[in-house]
Image (spheres, grey):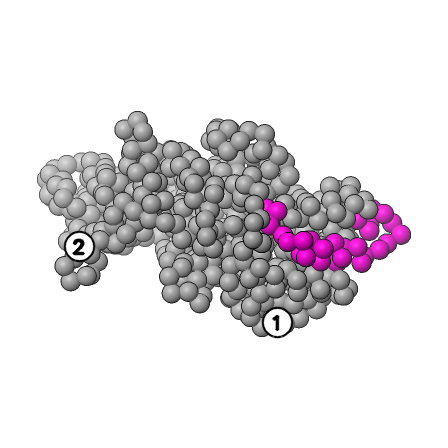
Amino acid sequence: MAAGSALALAVLAACDGGGGGGGSSGPAGGLVSTQPTPAPTPAAGTALDDSVRLAQQASFGPTMALVDRIRALGTNGWLDEQFAATGSTYGDLAVDVRSDFCAANDTACSTQRFSRTPVAMRFYADAITAPDQLRQRVAFALGQMIVASEAGVRSTAGIAAFNQLFLTHAFGNYRELLLAVTLNAYMGDYLDMADSRKGTPSENYAREFLQLFSMGPDKLGMDGSVQRDASGGPIPNYTADDIRDIARALTGWTYARVGNAAATDGKAIAYAQPMIAAPTRYDNAEKRFLGTVVAAGASQQASVAAVVDAAFNHASTPPFVARHLITHLVTPNPSPSYIGRIAAVFANNGSGVRGDLKAVVRAILVDAEARAPQGTNAGKLKEPVLAMTSLARAIGFTTDGYVFQVRDGSFGQPVMRAPSVFNFYPNDFPLPGSATLRSPASKLLTSANQLRLHNLVYDWTVNGEATRSEFAAVATLPGTSGSAPVWADWEAFGENVDGMVDRIDLLLFAKGLTKAQRDALKAAGSAITNADPKLQARKRAQMMLYVAATSPMFLVDR
């Protein structure tokens, strides 16, 4: 590695609280942090570019086109445009086939029909280039709260149909999302509601529906504070009896079958279709839960609606959902008043409607704590998925998504394959070294994963030529086109290294670099020379992007 790039790495790691931890050699001998680092802070008096900050919160990474669009329309104007935008879908992948559809040992067919691969590829391809960035980010957040995973059920059609629910309902009503998830066949298999029957009902879905998908285990104030009893213990939101009777209310549902096969044909499960009623398995006796009484003889549909309504209308659901969405879009350390303001919008959008996610998302992103953060607790650590997509979008990528879904497993975050219903990390995972702050993504940024991320950055910048083997199309997957970094915009800077530094400072740091850091980046780029002006510009950009994206500052969205 050139001396200038090594110095630049050291400067970006050390300035403004960004250093910490031991060092080890990366692919080119750079300094790599192998310990969790404190969140770096911009230089005193530095005003971060808010258009970039909004892009960090509401997209899969800033690009110049996106930042220019936000500047042109303003925050609310851009949000209006995004609420109307379309482009991402999994619908065409939600095509059910029988479990014996593939011939024995046909791994290509199995990958296409019985894995997350095609859906994860679409997720990444759309994250990089599709115009409906906000819808995708909200869907990604919802999918990390309401989890079903390839680790439990292997069906491409099911994974596609399940994740389509989040795109469809991202700006809809939370009640309708809960209802759709409850009757989703893929979820029905994952948490055992499918074929649950009277006499021996499964309680798995009922428990997670309350604990994770709606109200949470403890009674909350509207500001997200845990309510406590006289002895100081948290007040539970539900009892074992509530779970038992909700499970009874959710009996009597089974899978539709591919090609109208018999209900006894276990190889013909249609995961992409909602579950259908199986009346003989339904417990039609009276049920009591969460203050609700379902009368004996009530229909299966009425029982499901009663369960969904009881959870949706519970007093703890607005702050529980509000905190989750704030955590994934803006910060895992919101003030109680921020949670309270968003919970109030969930409870009433201003027109008497509860659960309006469009209103909730707007309120989260226009709130003062999102647009004008105060103190050193603002912002959040990028999780590996967002680190990958942010880098790729800043560079400029075309992709079918395959290389991303290969890489994400090495970071412990293979999308749509969470290890359990509790996702890849808990929302309350503590910031290392702090007794009070939360940093969910820190659970994934282990020493090993930081080194893997460093290696990815090196591979996609310094070694980031379109001919790189991992970018090639996959012959065994129909319709794949491969991936390629597009360096044309960077090559167009020519000798203008200052322009490159400006672009990197904007897209990766929201104009948060100090003069010393900018100078260090410039030195790293200027040290590279080549007789071919276009190649020289590209190599300079690649080196500076490598230095920038391996710095701790890049991993923290302020």
Q: Place residue 408 in its image quadrant.
A: bottom right
Q: Position of residue 552 (x, y in %)?
A: 58, 60
Badge 2 vs badge 1, beta-carbon distance below 8 Å: no
- Residue 156 appears in the rendering: yes
Which circle, 2 or 1, is nearer the viewer? 1
Residue plotted at (60% across, 50% down): 512
- Relative to 186, say whether 295 is above or below: above
Membership of 534 in magenta stretch: yes
Judge by depth and name the residue closer to the eye, 20 or 383.
20
Q: Which residues are magenta?
A: 510-537
The three-letter amino acid code for the residue at tag 1 is Gly
Classify mark 1: helix, strand or loop: strand
How many numbered badges does the structure rendering display?
2
Judge by depth and name the residue closer to the eye, 192 or 102.
192
For label 2, the residue is 239
Residue 22 as seen in the image, left or right of residue 293: right
Residue 542 as seen in the image, left or right of residue 18: right
- Residue 200 appears in the rendering: no
Q: Position of residue 521 (x, y in %)?
A: 71, 55
For label 1, the residue is 23
Membership of 322 in magenta stretch: no
Most extreme residue toward the front is 45
